[in-house]
Amino acid sequence: MTLDEAVDRALMNNKSLKAAAFDTTAVVFDNYRARSYRYPSLSINSKARFISELQSITTSLFSKEIGSKEQYQTDVTLSVPIFTGGKISSRIRMTKEQLAASRLQFSTIRLQTIHVSKDVYYQLMAADVSVKATEASMVRLDIIRQNVENLYQSGLADSLDILETMLAYETGSRSLSDMKTNFINASDVLKNVIGETNLSIEIVPSKALEIPTKPAYSSQTLSGVAGRPELSRLVHVIKAADEAASERRAAYFPNISGFAGYSYGMPNQDMFNKSWNDYFSAGISLNWSFNLGRETSYAVKSARAKASSLEMSYRAMEEALVLKAKIAYNNTLKSFSSYEIVQRELQFARRKYALAQQKQKEGNLSVNRLLEMEAELTTAEKRYEASIISFYRAENDFLYAIGSDKTTGVTP
């Protein structure tokens, strides 16, 4: 499995990412709902009822009941807002900012998922190269053991040399078993991240890492922190809070709406004749309410305080992210420097082991000393491979710190 494949599968498997997508969909409909308040509203009210007693007018000449014991009434009213003090506009702008923030929350989780999946993949690569380095060590130990056995048969080595090579080989076998267990564990962790349900398979990195190159620093690189989705999201959250304050402030103004209606029923407006009749109506209504406890004023102040709190959170987050980016970049430089040093150490260890092999064959070096140098070479090989992976893990942290989703470090 390649690094890109692991990242893609992790993105498809992440439940939080899917939840964020549904959250965004919900805010989209909230925005549609806010816009719908600008459209007319149609209401229909229909009822039928029976009244046992009616009011009546009685004179010396006649007696007349008012109304009808059987009443049927249907009212249809169409109303449209004319003036709301900015409530509808503020609500639309607020949900628009919330939608942008929700989409950036999706981007935040996506970036986190990429960072985590890359780091887990690099850990698997580290376990894989440790297994390979230990296997290479086992091959060298086996060659040494065979050479010592040949020397023993020729009378040029004693039983102590045989025991030392056997002990070294068994120690290497135990180390190889440990390395393989670490690889299996790292593979299981990656399977969990990418959602692999077949637990019987092992995931093996299919591509090698590129040789690291020294990262180039520029102030423009660190300025990428401003593009972190967390910061961009907070900008829209602050704007949404400002719009919420505007919506609260709109409560100071009246609501004015126009309406047109149609009424049909029996007896309807004709209270004396029990007949069906209808009529049309149109007009303007005004609704203006005041809370004597200054509820609106407190709501506006509360909304403004929340917006100010978010602004302070933005500044604190920006400072923290810039600091993390600088530290991550310094760690990347340190990892590259360590890689260069370990690379030279490996070259020395290989030359040293090659000379030791020649001396041991000539009988000028003890088996114990040769085994020590083999162990030094194995350690140098593991450190070299680990230094490359450590560099890319540090670079992964740096890319995450500046908000980049770039996948680097793997050869095609």
Image: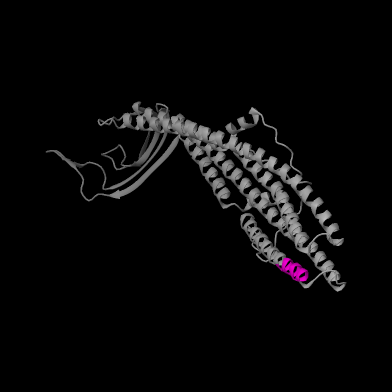
Pick the residue in front: 88 or 237: 237
The reply to whether the magenta stretch includes residue 222 is no
Asked whether residue 92 is in view, the answer is: no
Q: Is residue 56 left or right of residue 172?
A: left
Q: Is residue 95 above or below residue 370?
A: above
Q: Residue at x 44, y 29 (%)?
A: 242
- Identify the magenta region: 160-170
The number of callouts visible is 0
Farthest-out residue, left: 60
The x and y percentages for residue 309 are 42, 33
Q: How is the image coloured?
A: one colour
Residue closer to the observer: 220 or 15: 220
* Residue 29 appears in view: yes
x, y percent for residue 20 = 55, 46
Identify the residue at image location x=54%, y=38%.
Answer: 230
* Quadrant the N terminus occupies: bottom right
Camera-nearest residue between 176 and 225:
176
Query: Residue at the location (25% across, 42% down)?
Result: 67
Q: Name above or below for residue 286 compared with residue 264.
A: above
Measuring from the top left, give residue 367's x and y in whole percent.
Answer: 78, 63
Residue 162 within the segment the image draws in magenta: yes
Task: Classify residue 200 as left or right of residue 322.
Answer: right
Would you identify the image quadrant in which residue 396 lies? top right
Main secondary structure type of the part rendered in magenta? helix
- Residue 172 higher or lower than 95, as above or below: below
**Residue 145 or 37: which is nearer the viewer?**
145
Image spot of residue 394 (x, y percent)? 64, 43
Q: Is residue 291 left or right of residue 98?
A: left
